[in-house]
Image: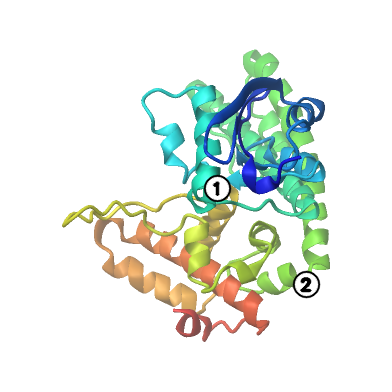
Amino acid sequence: MKEASTVYVGCDVGDRTSEVCILDHDGAVLERRNVRTTRRGLTGCLGRIGPATVAIEAGTHSRWIEETLMAAGHRVIVANPRQVQLIWKRGKKTDKADALLLARLARVDLSLLAPVHHRSRTSQVDLAAIRSRDILVRTRTRLFNHVRGTLKPFGVEPVRCSPAAFPDRVADEIPSELAPALEPILKVLRELNQQISAHDRQIDALATANPVAAQLATVDGVGALTALTFRLTVEDPAKFKKSRVVAAFLGLTPAKDQSGQSDPQRHISKAGDPLTRRLLVQCAHHLLGHTGADCDIRRWGLRLAERGGKDGRKRAIVAVARKLAVVMHRIWVTGQPYRPFREVSAAA
């Protein structure tokens, strides 16, 4: 039986089948196989070669594949697909070539794969509840817009009200000829409101029971939903040596494309978890709005908006979202309470 350091496997994972490429210590191809993307298919393929170093890309199936192969005695490296640009930027891209490249990168230098670590199962379960709420809210928004857009050509401007009250308030304004088209939509909206309320109660309970999330929720502009999502997404604050790095982890810092004397200013990278980033931006919108609480972060953001020119407010919102991430991480690491008029100077 071979040692883990002498056999290298690249696995390009698909929903139904996966391409597997096995290399020996010298980089020669020992075997290529196309297997079913199932526990039996993968362990059956790799069970005959003994312990190996297996490289896969992070994706929908990577969590259970990692657990399955590690239980079988293999070393599993989960590559960051955004960093392994050799794969998705090639002119001729095939599953077989991707599997071979993953195996060669694992053999040469594991750091080239920019390995990522999956969150704990508990965190993933709690995040699933948050993401379910998010898709329900976005679906409700699309249905709201559909109802409003359908009524306007008929001279009806629906009243502005809360999402919970909207289906009942607008029902009386619908012309009789549009009732067959819109009443089923209103019925779905009522059901969505109930489901979203149930998710809100669940998330509030989770945030209250989590000491870190409860502490992060004390930051001005940040609610229980954002605090809990930030806590579950970051999971381990110690993996960031500096609090500023967490903003880059969430894609809130400008991307870089430097070459020689050229170093153009680019938009934020949008790396990391999009939901957490979107929630932080929403918090920044609220904090800089008319009802935002007075604090150092708000004052700092308003000053940025005033001097930022044409896109000053947009830049200020992103900057405030970035600052919120930094402050929340700093509070988490130090355990100190949030101080509305000291956090910016301490974390800047």
Q: Quadrant of residue 175?
A: top right
- Residue 63 percent location from the top left of the image: 72, 42
- Residue 250 percent location from the top left of the image: 52, 56
Q: Quadrant of the C terminus?
A: bottom left
The residue wearing badge 1 is 274
Nearer the N terminus, badge 1 or badge 2? 2
Picture layout, residue 21 above or below residue 117: above
Q: Is residue 37 left or right of residue 86?
A: right
Graded by Cα atoms within 10 Å as few (under 14), some (14 to 19) or many (20 or more), the crowding at tag 1 reads few
Taking the spot 81% from the left edge, 60% from the top edge, the residue there is 206
The residue wearing badge 2 is 211
Q: Quadrant of residue 122?
A: bottom right
Relative to the observer, which residue lies in front, 4 or 296?
Answer: 4
Which residue type does callout 2 highlight?
A: Pro
Graded by Cα atoms within 10 Å as few (under 14), some (14 to 19) or many (20 or more), the crowding at tag 2 reads few
Taking the spot 52% from the left edge, 86% from the top edge, the residue there is 342
- The answer, for residue 290, to whether it is visible in the render is no
Picture layout, residue 325 above or below residue 100: below
Taking the spot 68% from the left edge, 39% from the top edge, the residue there is 62
Q: Quadrant of the N terminus?
A: top right
Relative to the observer, which residue lies in front, 10 or 282?
Answer: 10
- The answer, for residue 245, to whether it is visible in the render is yes
- Residue 18 percent location from the top left of the image: 65, 25
Cα distance between the residues tagged 1 and 2: 24 Å
